C-alpha cells in the first residue's frame, strides 16, 4: 500500500506493509485493503510504519489526520519532533 505523508514543507510517498497510529479512539494498524476511514491523530504520539523492505520507521506528530482508502493512506501532519 502507498503511504503519502504531507508535511508543512514537503510531501513524500513510500510503499509500506502497514501504518500504526494512535487516535483519541485508540490504536489503529492500517494495512492494504483496510476499510476507508478518516482518523484524527492523538497529539504528540508516535506514528510507526513498516516499509515493504521490512525496515520500520517512526516519528512523533504534534497533530494530524490520516485518510485511508483501500490501497492509499494519506497522512497530513503538522509539526514533527
Image (cartoon, rainbow, N blue to C red):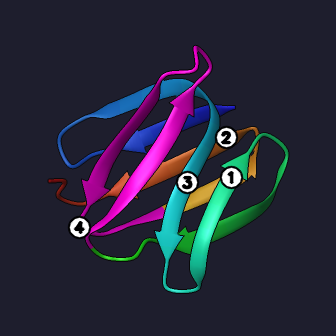
Q: Earlier in the sequence, mark 3 or mark 1?
A: 3
In the picture of the structure, the residue carrying the numbered disc 3 is 20
Count residues near mark 3 (Cα–Cα under 10 Å), then give few for <14, some for 14-19, many for 20+: some
> Is residue 71 toward the left or the right of residue 45 in the image?
right
Residue 15 badge: none
Q: Earlier in the sequence, mark 4 or mark 1?
A: 1
Q: Earlier in the sequence, mark 4 or mark 2?
A: 4
Alpha carbon distance from label 3 to label 4 = 15 Å
**Residue in view at x 48 percent, y 22 percent:** 55
Closest to the camera, between mark 2 and mark 1, is 1
Q: Which residues are magenta?
A: 44-65
Residue 30 percent location from the top left of the image: 68, 52
In the picture of the structure, the residue carrying the numbered disc 4 is 62
Quadrant in the picture for residue 76: bottom left
| Mark 3 and mark 2 residues within 8 Å of each other at the beta carbon | no
Q: Secondary structure at mark 1?
A: strand
> Is residue 14 toward the left or the right of residue 59 in the image?
right
In the picture of the structure, the residue carrying the numbered disc 1 is 30
Q: Earlier in the sequence, mark 3 or mark 4?
A: 3
**Residue in view at x 27 percent, y 56 percent:** 60
Q: Earlier in the sequence, mark 2 or mark 1?
A: 1
| Mark 4 and mark 2 residues within 8 Å of each other at the beta carbon | no
Q: Quadrant of the N terminus?
A: top right
Alpha carbon distance from label 4 to label 2 = 22 Å
Q: Earlier in the sequence, mark 3 or mark 2?
A: 3
| Mark 2 and mark 1 residues within 8 Å of each other at the beta carbon | no
Q: Secondary structure at mark 4?
A: loop
Alpha carbon distance from label 4 to label 1 = 20 Å
Amino acid at each position: 500500500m502507498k503511504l503519502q505523508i504531507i508535511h508543512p514543507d514537503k510531501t513524500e510517498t513510500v510503499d509500506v506493509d502497514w501504518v500504526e497510529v494512535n487516535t483519541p479512539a485508540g490504536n489503529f494498524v492500517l494495512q492494504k485493503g483496510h476499510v476507508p476511514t478518516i482518523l484524527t491523530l492523538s497529539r504528540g504520539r508516535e506514528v510507526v510504519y513498516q516499509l515493504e523492505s521490512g525496515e520500520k520507521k517512526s516519528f512523533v506528530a504534534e497533530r494530524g489526520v490520516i485518510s485511508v482508502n483501500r490501497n492509499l493512506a494519506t497522512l497530513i501532519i503538522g509539526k514533527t519532533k
